[in-house]
Image (cartoon, coloured by chain):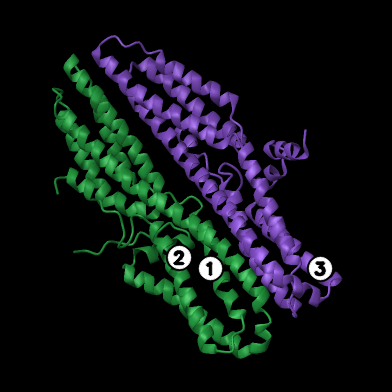
Chain colours: A green, B purple
Amino acid sequence: MMPTPIPLEGLDPVATILLWLAVQPAGLGAALVIGTGVVISAIGITVVTLVAAPATLLENNLLGGAKFAFLAQVFAALLAFVLVDGGIRYTDARGSLQAEASALRLLDETVSELAHPAREDIRAAIRAYADTVVRSEFITMQQGRESPTAAAAFDRLIDLHVGALPADERDALIRLQADSFLARAVSARATRINAVRPGLKSLVWMIVAFNTGLAITFSWFFGNPSYVGQLSMGVLLTTAIMTVVYMAILLNHPFSGDLAISPQPFRFLLGR
Amino acid sequence: MSQVEALLRDMAGSGGYFQWLIHQPMGVILLVIVGGGLVFIVGGVLLANNYLTPEELISNTLVGTFKFMFLAQIFTGVLAFIMVEAGNRYANAEAYVDTEIRGLRLLSRVVSHMPLENQTRFGDALKEYAKSVAETEWPMMASGDDSPISRAAFRRMLGVYFSFNPVDVSDRSVVAMGNLAVAMAVEARTNRLNNNVSRELSNFIWLSLLGLVVITAMFNWFFGTRGLRSQVAMGIALGSSILTCVFIVFLLANPFAGDTAIPPTPFLELAG
């Protein structure tokens, strides 16, 4: 089986790094994010301990402790924001994917009752669209955009459906029902694409990276007579910070990596 | 009129200070918010150290720490709330623009099954509306307003659509599907405008955040350590963290203004 290509083209450097991390297996991604933080933290603590005398650093502890605790609160608010935002996007993406597949399934069932000769063409267009979503859009959504192929397939479905004008009252009633399912699919598709839009994500992540750096480096300048104690606490704190950061990265990429939302609802439409 | 009311009105109006700031390049916004804030923090620290002895400042630190921690909790609560609110505002604005475009495109496809005269008139009205949104409504939305020209163009477009008189079952089917598309476009347009206007509450929240930032900065002035350099460095670190969060919230809360504004590209494409 061919490996899934990593869709990195056309992204800014921040988005490229984040997507690259998100598409890695969870174990490797976590090791890279947490490991990088821990190594930087350990090096920083060691260098500061070697350069500055513990007695000098001890004087920072009282005031520094208060400011560090304040910084922790601000950083927590920032992390909570990216987690909540990512969580909402993840839930929206999963919910709209299921809603769209359900609407298309209902459309398929309803259209099959039409007497119009275009009936089978519409049903084939539903399958063709589902196929392009699975094959193409699940890759482009990782980049935060819709697939032109899937968009064209969806437009073709709309054109076929709208063009299948009913000849009698029975077909008109069935069409009326089918219209509402198609409108539901249009709306769900819009929600799904919007859930992965980049927005100001890169800028927000630059601020997160800056604040993560501050949170890690601030603790280097506290004094502790025990180097081992200072190093252990620094490493533990950095591990906790980087774990949450990695969790936020995954939540903000709902169609990438090990935690990616599955295209199974669309595969059901294809009978797989 | 109280001074607070006057300030809120000033901020809500197009000539408000915040409105001036959001129209500046992103680098200038960063400089004003983060640079200006840091100058305020560091200047205050230096001033306090000039008038008070280190012993006096250190004795403040012992008591002030607990109060500072209490302030941190309040500040974080407000900051987290505003961040989520601003993030939602930006994401919703993107979603409403996208849904409106999808609704209008769907309506256009439906109208293509009406007589040629209706198609031509609707096509012209749609282009006129899309052009007016991109060219007149977008700049006005940056100031929290909507455009009377776009409002009139939207009414004209709907007027053209509703001028179609269905005569048989097939025509009624076209209208039924079209009505769903109209509902989608009307709702999205209303949401887009409502999401952007009525800023009084958000301005009050902004004022609260600004007040808390100033209080936090001033609190820092009255703490002390033996080394002034450490105190300044810690003040800069904490200040940078707080101010970068304020910076990103400021950009997210203004989705139609400045360098990070949502572009009117989909409307320009629709206008041809």
Location of residue B161 in the rendering, given as x and y in whole percent from the top left corner: 41, 18
Q: CA distance from mark 2 to mark 1?
A: 8 Å
Q: Are marks 2 and 1 on the same chain?
A: yes
- Inspect the image, locate mark 2, and give the three-letter code of the amino acid beneath it: Val
Secondary structure of the residue carrying tag 2 is: helix
Q: Local crowd at mark 1 within 10 Å, few (<14), some, or many (≥20)?
A: many
> To which chain does the residue with label 1 belong?
A
Q: Nearer the viewer, residue B116 or A178?
A: A178
* Type of the residue with mark 1: Thr
* Quadrant assignment, res A130: top left
Which kind of residue does numbered mark 3 sit on?
Ala
- Check residue A212 in the rendering and tell me which mark sits there, or answer none: 1
Which residue, given by chain and number where applicable, does mark 3 sit on? B48
Residue A182 appears left or right of B98: left
Residue A113 shown left or right of residue B109 in the figure: left
Question: Badge 2 is on which residue?
Answer: A245
Q: Foreground residue, A175 or A247? A: A247
Q: Looking at the image, which residue is at 40% across and 53% down?
A: A87
Q: Chain of mark 3?
A: B
The residue at the point 59 percent across, 34 percent down is B197
On screen, residue A162 versus residue A145, left or right, reads left
